[in-house]
């Protein structure tokens, strides 16, 4: 589906999947927000990475002073009674000015080479390396969308 928010995309995907299988479904999706580019690429990050890549993102940002960025995630659970959506906006990071670091085999995105998390002392995710990243918790603010879903599932 085409939509301008990750939350709307998971709602559409979950509703469609539930309509096909008639059973409880869970859908998860993520996006990448650059506020100075009007929140682009948002949910279109996969397409942007496949077409212009991280180099293209940096080229778009070449004359931009505000290099802040963050990840967003949403998960939807849809069953016969209801649909619930849980979302999370990640911590504010900065975009590097060049591609830096080797992409680890277990990296979840080429963005690792251009995103500088606030806790990394100026290093990109790729430069920090997996051993120094305990898990995704260092990229999210508050409870991740997955943790929120887990809390919900444990409450029913």
Image (cartoon, grey):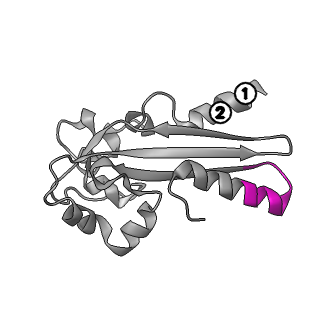
Which residue is disc 2 drawn over?
150
Extent of the magenta region: 15-25
Q: Where is residue 12 in the image (x, y as percent from the top left)?
A: 67, 57
Q: Residue at x 58, y 33 (%)?
A: 147
* Count of marks, rendered view: 2
Location of residue 93 (image quadrant): top left
Using the image as rendered, state which of residue 52 and residue 7 is in the foreground. Answer: 7
* Pick the front one: 153 or 3: 3
Pinpoint residue 79: horizontal percent, then vertical percent: 81, 45
Report, in whole angstroms, how far the alpha carbon at label 1 lies from the one at label 2. 6 Å
- Residue at 33% x, 56% y: name it: 111
Q: Please, which residue is most extreme toward the bottom here?
A: 51
Q: In this view, does 54 lie to the left or right of 26?
A: left
Toward which corner of the image does residue 155 lie, by quadrant?
top right
What secondary structure do most residues of the magenta stretch adopt? helix
Label 2: element kind: helix
At horizontal 62% and vertical 52% (from top left) the residue drawn is 10
Question: Is the Cβ of the residue at disc 1 closer than 8 Å to that at disc 2?
Answer: yes
Query: In the picture shown, does residue 81 fall above or below 18?
Result: above
Residue furthest to the front: 38
- Percent across and percent down for residue 3 are 55, 60
**Is residue 87 covered in magenta?**
no
Residue 132 falls left or right of residue 6: left
Residue 74 vs residue 78: left or right?
left
Residue identified by numbered label 1? 154
- x then y, percent, for residue 126: 27, 51
The N terminus, quarter of image: bottom right
């Amino acid at each position: 589906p085409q939509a301008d928010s990750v939350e709307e995309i998971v709602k559409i995907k979950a509703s469609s999947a539930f309509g096909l299988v008639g059973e409880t479904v869970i859908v998860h999706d993520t996006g990448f927000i650059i506020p100075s580019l009007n929140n682009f690429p948002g949910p279109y990050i996969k397409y942007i990475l496949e077409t212009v890549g991280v180099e293209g993102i940096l080229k778009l940002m070449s004359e931009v002073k505000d290099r802040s960025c963050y990840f967003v995630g949403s998960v939807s659970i849809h069953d016969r009674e209801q649909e619930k959506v849980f979302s999370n906006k990640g911590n504010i990071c900065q975009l590097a000015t060049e591609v830096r670091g080797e992409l680890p085999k277990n990296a979840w995105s080429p963005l690792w080479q251009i995103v500088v998390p606030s806790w990394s002392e100026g290093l990109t995710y790729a430069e920090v390396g997996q051993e120094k990243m305990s898990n995704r918790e260092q990229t999210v603010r508050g409870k991740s969308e997955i943790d929120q879903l887990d809390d919900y599932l444990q409450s029913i």
